Image (cartoon, rainbow, N blue to C red):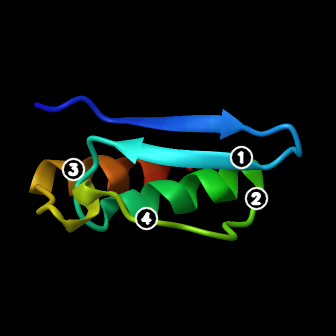
Amino acid sequence: MEKKCIQIKLKPDGSMELETHGVKGKQCLKYMDIFAEMLRAQITDSAFTEEYYETETAAETQVVEEVEAKA
């Protein structure tokens, strides 16, 4: 199973840049929404990586749903 992570870069102006790794398909959008809610932040711009266009698995969907339930 591929390792999943979210890379967070804090910029000097106080803004943040988040990038998911190992998350296929539209699941990355759910992770971004969860982080935006937790940080009380607004997503102002986004771009898709190659992984966005890959097929997600049922296991990935379950993990995101479990994280959302705990939030």
The mark found on residue 41 in the picture is 2
SS for dot 2: loop
The mark found on residue 60 in the picture is 3
Which of the 4 image quadrants contains residue 56? bottom left
Foreground: disc 3 or disc 4: 4
Q: Position of residue 32 (x, y in %)?
A: 52, 57
Of labels 1 and 2, earlier in sequence is: 1
Which of the 4 image quadrants contains residue 21? top left
Residue that badge 1 annotates: 16
Q: Amino acid at mark 2?
A: Ala
Of labels 1 and 3, earlier in sequence is: 1
SS for dot 4: helix
Q: Position of residue 63 (x, y in %)?
A: 29, 46
Q: Amino acid at mark 4?
A: Leu
Q: CA–CA distance between discs 1 and 3?
A: 25 Å
Q: Is residue 25 above or below residue 19?
A: below
Q: Amino acid at mark 1?
A: Met
Q: CA–CA distance between discs 4 and 2?
A: 14 Å
Count the marks: how many?
A: 4
Callout 3 touching callout 2 (CB < 8 Å)? no
Q: Is residue 16 above or below residue 32?
A: above
The mark found on residue 29 in the picture is 4
SS for dot 3: helix
Q: CA–CA distance between discs 3 and 4?
A: 12 Å
Of labels 3 and 4, earlier in sequence is: 4
Tell me which residue sits at (15%, 48%) in the image.
59
Q: Nearer the viewer, residue 38 or 47?
A: 47
Q: Is residue 64 left or right of residue 14?
A: left
Q: Amino acid at mark 3?
A: Glu
Foreground: disc 3 or disc 2: 2
Within 10 angstroms of label 1, few (less than 14), some, or many (20 or more) residues? few
SS for dot 1: strand
